[in-house]
Amino acid sequence: MDMTEKCDGKCGSCTKVDECDDPRKEQYLEQQMLKTRMSKIKHKIAVISGKGGVGKSTVTVNLAMSFAMHGYANSVGILDADIHGPSVPKMLGLRGQKLQAIPIGIFPVMGPLGIKVVSMDFLLSSDDAPVVWRGPLKMKAIKQFLSDITWGELEFLFIDLPPGTGDEPLSVMQLIPDLDGVIIVTIPSEVSQVVVRKAVTFARQLGVPTIGIIENMSGFVCPKCGTETSIFKTGGGRKIAQDMSVPFLGSIPIDPEICRDSDNGMPFITEHTDSPATKAFSEIVKKIQQFLEDPVLLQRMAVKRKK
Amino acid sequence: MDMTEKCDGKCGSCTKVDECDDPRKEQYLEQQMLKTRMSKIKHKIAVISGKGGVGKSTVTVNLAMSFAMHGYANSVGILDADIHGPSVPKMLGLRGQKLQAIPIGIFPVMGPLGIKVVSMDFLLSSDDAPVVWRGPLKMKAIKQFLSDITWGELEFLFIDLPPGTGDEPLSVMQLIPDLDGVIIVTIPSEVSQVVVRKAVTFARQLGVPTIGIIENMSGFVCPKCGTETSIFKTGGGRKIAQDMSVPFLGSIPIDPEICRDSDNGMPFITEHTDSPATKAFSEIVKKIQQFLEDPVLLQRMAVKRKK
């Protein structure tokens, strides 16, 4: 029996939803709230990886900025779903800010170009405070981030997930059934490839489309002599994409400026518009746009939304 | 009431442990088994980080090899506690191997120099299979890795934990109360520092000593012209160590050979004995040895073990 479908205020034990004391009511209302909030966001995209430290947050932040810069200012949101290691606020220069809780709702922190950001970091009392939470609490937090925050009307919501295929990614995929798809970030090393293949299978098992794979930290060009060194090898991302029949979105070279920009709270695509990394990133964004405009996908999403 | 203390076969409802049907018996036996297994391992050290991709597994594998090479062959174990993204087997050239389950017990996979390795990777049917598990299952798996595997007498057990301060690190710290300490790995970037500070606080809150911080990927020297570029900045690890009053163990420079060695299943300290990375690593190992030989610490550990 689907409890949430049953408890609609017409179960016979009450006549009005606000008078109902059925224990299922809370769950029902929560789910309705989640559905309502999410229905106002046109595209929801999760950024995942198998392995940590591959640049997921950097990709998320720069993707959001890229869309905000090209016609979607004030229409982009980022959910930093990394409960233990939130880094989106630092990368957007938003550290120390707090979510705004006022009588009409809880509001995201407003970043550059009106990007709405929600992160565990905005709830912590101190910089050093770790979030020592097991899975069920993390699931609850993510659910609340999605349902209790007044996201408003958005064109895009990018969700930065922690590495792995555990509680947080699973929660997000289950809570947002009409997720457009996942973007998988990897570095080229074989060690990373082994783990990233699992992420592709994970998305497949959960029935979420893979928008494509991005290879990050792909070769380093010495700023003095121009020699290119493949610190983490190159081509690993394309190889997995081919092996697993998912689109390859592109490679982003290693650039010390990216780290510096992230540390300074500035997305690299706005700070270094002519760098090879920014150019590579623009191509990646184009491919994501093409995916989102695909009529087959649009139709499928419309059907999912109606449900 | 501490159930495990009560259920000792003398609770009154039975006269022999093997006749007891108290539901607490299983838990009691499990804990006794864990205690027995762990009591045979002299030093247990966890390698943690706040952020992923900082080289935790690389550090773990090379630490284990380093001790195995210097007097402790056949006396070192590695528990790869990264359930979603196990990479230790790949780094030691052990992929495709399986744990040996024979009537007298389940045995670790034997790596180079007799290093005993246990990893989720040895239980998976295929390379692409993700482990889509929530927290409680992961806790159970780690508990079994520690208690059900015949580790035997060991001088050192290194535990490679996934990033963050969630289920896996929490489980390990709770399951092994006499952990010698944690080694925290970071990269120098500020974004990483923010997260690593949380790891230091986490260890502190759980009462586990911090052996020290290792800064990995600290500057890259162009193999052609010799110019050093700080891809992820430098000095971040030392800064956190100072700020938080924990020992700084050393910096390991970025070296493309490290990635290549890891991909080839060879620890870099045995493959490139003269590289700056290997030299830096040797210094780190010395400091860890000093920590372990510290009589104050030894005394404290002895008191803990007696309990």
Image (tube, coloured by chain):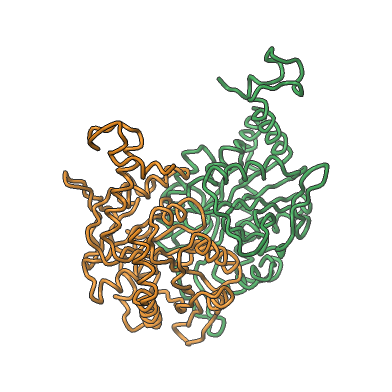
Chain colours: A green, B orange
Residue at horizontal 56 percent and vertical 47 percent from the top: A182
In the rendered structure, the answer to whether residue B20 lies left or right of residue B222 reads left
Q: Where B189 sits versus B148, above or below? A: below
On the rendered image, what quadrant is the N terminus of chain A found in? top right
Instruction: Pinpoint residue A164: horizontal percent, then vertical percent.
Output: 48, 51
Instruction: Pinpoint residue B75: horizontal percent, then vertical percent.
Output: 23, 66
Residue extending farthest front: B12
Exactly how many numbered labels are in the figure? Answer: 0
Q: Nearer the viewer, residue A217 or A297?
A: A217
Instruction: Pinpoint residue B56: horizontal percent, then vertical percent.
Output: 43, 65
Q: Quadrant of residue A42?
A: top right
**Residue B24 seen by the camera:** yes
Instruction: Pinpoint residue B15: horizontal percent, then vertical percent.
Output: 24, 34
Q: Quadrant of residue B181?
A: bottom left
Residue at horizontal 62 percent and vertical 49 percent from the top: A159
Residue at horizontal 36 percent and vertical 71 percent from the top: B299
On the rendered image, what quadrant is the C terminus of chain A found in? top right
Residue extending farthest right: A103
Q: Quadrant of residue B281?
A: bottom left
Residue extending farthest left: B103
Q: Where A261 sits versus A182, above or below? A: below
Q: Nearer the viewer, residue B25 or B52?
A: B25
